[in-house]
Amino acid sequence: MISEGHERPLACWRGKERHNGTILECLTVIFKTAGCAWNQCLMCGYRHERFASMESIMGQERHLLSQLAWVQERYRPHDYQMVKIFTSGSFFDLLEIPRSVMQKIAAAFRGKLVIAETRPEFVTDETIIPFLGEIDDGSWNTPLYCAIGLETSDDRVREKCIRKGFLYKDFIGAARHAQTLGAGVKAYLLLKPLFLTEREAIDDMKSSIYDVLHHTDLISMNPCTVQGHTELEWYWRQGAYRPPYLWSVLSVLDDTPVPITCDPVGGGRKRGPHNCGSCDKVIVQGIRDYSLNGDRELIASMLETECACKEEWHHVLDQEMPFCMPLTR
Ligand code: SF4
Ligand SMILES: [Zn+2]
């Protein structure tokens, strides 16, 4: 029976994920929390989805447990094997997810393969060890992956175009620490942050993938989308930003040393990665299929297909000029 009064998380849905060559049923949950401790990334809309600032700690815990109860009432544990957890910021920030709530979430997902997103500074002994100990029932060699939004391995791009507030060496430190504690690491990389040309964005993504390859267990490429109430949206409205072409997404996927996953959120829409409108649907579906089946020939064959917008994409790659960002103040 579904009881009344439990709060919805920001989002929660079922899907499939490829992991170590097999397809797993996956539950994705985005918990609403007190908000991201950093709260400054130029493209991030989730940071605005937070509890009111006057909410007490007790109130926050109640809201979080209510969201967890909502999830437990609707999704039966034996229907999925993997859980991806996001919050308004970082799952392992104790100011967002208090220790007692974190342990209840761990108990709820015991035996699942958990991928939890966090900034690198929250990968600590005091968060990872108890959480990992609680979810691990021996079902998985690596029951927990810390997913970190590195976005790019280039510190200047991360600082100037994303305003992420941490360095590549911080990511590497967190990755090593997580692995020492028995957790895996997933890197989220952002295709085409603000101020990069289409060509620069492709080059940045390719070099980032090579750089992180030996420091992570999983890599996911996120083609940038224009979320509401963000600085990125402001530039987009001025015509100073265009989300990446789907051709660019394909060209990266076609050239990675190992298969990586990619969910083109908002694919084919003007705020998401898109081409001309007529070829988008097939390519978006193909990219989603590739993330599940790892079939590189599918990517190569889609990259060979013809559409009038492909010439436009080549023109953009050749002719788009970089913005000038000062290095000093
Ligand atoms: S992208 Fe992550 S770190 Fe940046 S503001 Fe959003 S939630 Fe915070
Ligand atoms: Zn087209």
Image: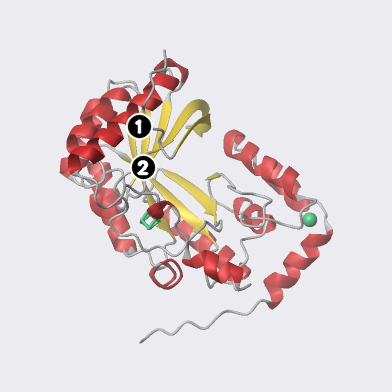
Extreme bottom residue here?
Answer: 329
Q: Give the vertical position of 168 relative to 23 (above or below).
A: below
- Residue drawn at (34%, 59%) of the image: 39
Q: Residue 322 at what x, y percent from top left?
A: 58, 79
Q: Residue 119 at what x, y percent from top left?
A: 31, 52
Q: Which mark is residue 312?
A: none
The residue at which mark 2 appears reads as 32
| Ligand 1 closer than 8 Å to label 1 CB | no
Query: Which of 294 and 77 lies nearest the eye of the viewer?
Result: 77
Q: As shown in the figure, which amino acid type bears the numbered disc 2?
A: Lys
Q: Residue 191 at what x, y percent from top left?
A: 54, 59
- Residue drawn at (52%, 51%) of the image: 221
Query: Which of 219 and 267 lies nearest the eye of the viewer?
Result: 267
Q: Are marks 2 and 1 in contact (CB under 8 Å)?
A: yes
Say if residue 193 shows up in the picture. no
The residue at which mark 1 appears reads as 67
Q: As shown in the figure, which amino acid type bears the numbered disc 1?
A: Gln
Quadrant (top left/top right/bottom left/bottom right) for the C terminus:
bottom left
